[in-house]
Image (cartoon, rainbow, N blue to C red):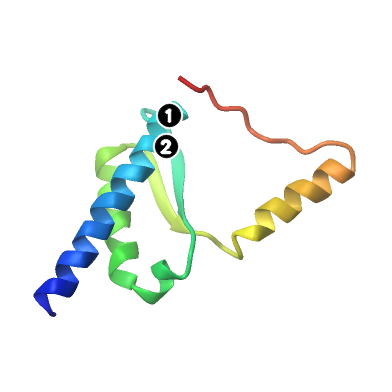
Amino acid sequence: GDAVAVGILRAAANELESSAMSVARRLDLVGGEFPFILAGGIFKAVPWLNGELSRRLPLVAPGSTVRLLDGEPASGAVHLALQEARGGARVPRYRMN
């Protein structure tokens, strides 16, 4: 492939890995079992990026898994809103450092 395009993809993977790990550390998830959920069309449009993060993230966060979101990102918000309307949504509480 084109060297510039490959460089852009590698930089994107680096940024996404860094961001995902920052969130995982902030929520005190690192060290346990937890999923990284990849959401957005880019992961379907660029399978390399999906594969690269699926390879990298479990290496830097042992016990983690990586998968694509099954459905639309907004469906989670709709689901929580419906639960809340029916008497209370169960939202996990994470420890914030």
Q: CA distance from mark 1 to mark 2?
A: 5 Å
Amino acid carrying label 2: it is Val
Which label is found at residue 26?
A: 1
User: How packed is label 1: few (under 14 Cα within 10 Å), some, or many (20 or more)?
Assistant: some
Residue 40 spot, x, y in % from top left: 48, 64
User: How packed is label 2: few (under 14 Cα within 10 Å), some, or many (20 or more)?
Assistant: few
Q: Residue at x 82, y 41 (%)?
A: 84
Asked whether the beta carbons under mark 1 and mark 2 sit within 8 Å of each other, the answer is yes
Amino acid carrying label 1: it is Arg
Residue 33 spot, x, y in % from top left: 43, 35
- Among the 4 quarters of the image, the one containing residue 74: bottom right
Residue 92 spot, x, y in % from top left: 63, 32
Q: Residue at x 52, y 60 (%)?
A: 69
**Up-down: is 83 above or below 31?**
below
Residue position marked by numbered label 2 in the rendering = 23
Q: Residue at x 29, y 43 (%)?
A: 18
At numbered mark 1, what does the secondary structure look like: helix, strand or loop? Answer: helix
> Most extreme residue toward the left, as rendered?
3
In this rendering, would 4 be left or right of 13?
left
